[in-house]
Every structure is written in structure tokens, then in C-alpha cells.
Image (cartoon, grey):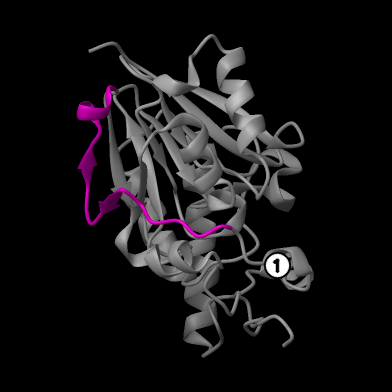
Amino acid sequence: MSRTKVVPIPVMGRHHINAYLLLGRRPVIVDAGTPGSGRRIYEQVAAHGVDPTDVSLIVITHGHIDHFGSAAELHRLTGAPVAGHIADLGPYRAGRAREPYIPTGPMGRLMARNKNLHIQVEPLEPDVVVTGETDLEDFGIAARVMPTPGHTAGSISVLTDRGDLVAGDLIANSLFGLVRGRPANPPFHDDPLRNLASLRKMLALNPTSLHVGHGTPLEPDRVRRWADREHRRLSRREAAGRSAAGGAGPYRAPS
């Protein structure tokens, strides 16, 4: 089987929100962006010389609307089945992210008040329900879906044969992707300690690069150093009896 190539598909800005096209024997899309971006993703796939109707699978990394907001539309446009983890079926079926949002810091507290985070999008029933590590060879690429819970309970990543880790929101570039190459938490994590454990587990597999939902690819050694600092920070907070989420209370949309 041909080796898998990872191609970024910008959904918002140049790197602010990303989907990805994985190229092997058949193409696979990872993530579907915000509501209304299905056509844009479809056209960018075609611009890379790929017939979008040849896409064999759409993998959704987790149940936040900037990642599954256009999944149902993209499914209709391409005809490809959609894969999502069983633990995030609730958000997919409801068309809403699970709330409350738990900010990781000031950016998350600010963003949580954005009404666009709390809208309902078109619901989705995944055709392929992920329950554990899943080989994607049958879908035409040399890669595995890896459960990476913590950002949400059903967060997943895709690890290719070349060592590229398409990591969703397991890690991000600083300031929601605006500061390129600098590792940081995304604005929210359901469980920061569990997410950090998932990140370190993936780093132990020695990926060559981390392709994230928000920002440019991250260099693994730099992420390792960040993860060590984050482990110390969270351990201090835990020892002090404070929230691992930085003392920021959960935010639920006003009724």
C-alpha cells in the first residue's frame, strides 16, 4: 500500500481551523469544520486533484461543532461514510456539543460566551462507530485511528504509517492557532489530566509531526517539553486542591 500523505485543508483562515486530506490508495478526510463549510472542503479536495466522490471515509476527531459542524453536509456531497467514537455519539446525534464547556484559561472563558459555540448544527449518525484502535487499511490508507480521550470523552486521532499524527484538539498552537509552532492547550478540555495522558501516550509512539485542528504542524520534541511543563503545572494545582482546568468554572450557554 502506498505511504500516506497528510494535506491540510484550511476551513477558517490559513490555519485557524483545519480539516485534513489523507492521501493513500484512496483518500480519507479528517474533520469537517464549522457549519456551512462542507462545500469549501469539497472544493479544496478537488483542487488537490482528488475526485471528492472517491473519498472512502470521513473521520471526525471529536464532538465539537468546529470539527463536526459540516459532517452531514460533507457526507451528502461525497457519499463517504462518517466515523466517530462511541463516547461522542450524544453530541453527534443532538447536533450540539456536550455542555458545559470547561475552559483551560482566559481564551476559553472569553470564547465560551460566543453564542456561535452553542448553536445546534445538523445532527449526524456515524456509519462507523469507533470503540478502540481501528486500522484504516480497508479504507485505503496506511493509518490507525487512536482513541485519545480527554479533550472530549470520544476524542480520537489518526496515526499514519509515516508517523504523522492528525491530532484534532489533543494539542493546539497557542492562542487558538494564531501563534504558529508554539504548543498550547486548546480553549477547552473536558478533562485536562486525561487529555495530557493521551498526549503523552501518543508522544511515546514517536510521531514525526503533530497536525492539529488549530494552527500549523507541531514538532514532537517541542510538544514533549510543553507536556512536561503542563504535567508539573497540573500536578501543582491538583496538590493544592484546585481545578486542573485552571480554576475556571464550567460555562453553559444562557437559557
Q: Position of residue 101 (x, y in %)?
A: 60, 74
Q: Position of residue 182 (x, y in %)?
A: 66, 42
Position of 111 relative to 84 (above/below)? below
Q: Is residue 228 left or right of residue 99?
A: left
Q: Nearer the viewer, residue 16 or 37?
A: 37
Q: Quadrant of the N terminus?
A: top left
Q: Which residues are magenta?
A: 122-140
Position of 72 relative to 50 (above/below)? below
Which residue is disc 1 drawn over? 108
From where the camera sits, is residue 143 visible?
yes
> Please, what secondary structure does the residue beneath circle 1 have?
helix
Q: Position of residue 194 (x, y in %)?
A: 39, 67
User: Which residue is depicted at the point 47% across and 74% down?
Assistant: 235
Q: Quadrant of residue 198?
A: bottom left
Q: Is residue 33 left or right of residue 239?
A: right
Q: Is residue 66 left or right of residue 207?
A: right
Q: Position of residue 14 (x, y in %)?
A: 74, 31
Q: Quadrant of the C terminus?
A: bottom right
Q: Nearer the viewer, residue 98 or 107?
A: 98
From where the camera sits, is residue 218 visible?
no
Position of 9 relative to 50 (above/below)? below
User: Which residue is depicted at the point 34% across and 18% down?
Assistant: 26
Q: Quadrant of residue 233?
A: bottom right
Q: Is residue 137 shown in magenta?
A: yes
User: Which residue is depicted at the point 20% across and 28% down?
Assistant: 138
Q: Is residue 36 shown in magenta?
A: no
Q: Quadrant of residue 106?
A: bottom right
User: Which residue is depicted at the point 34% across and 21% down?
Assistant: 162
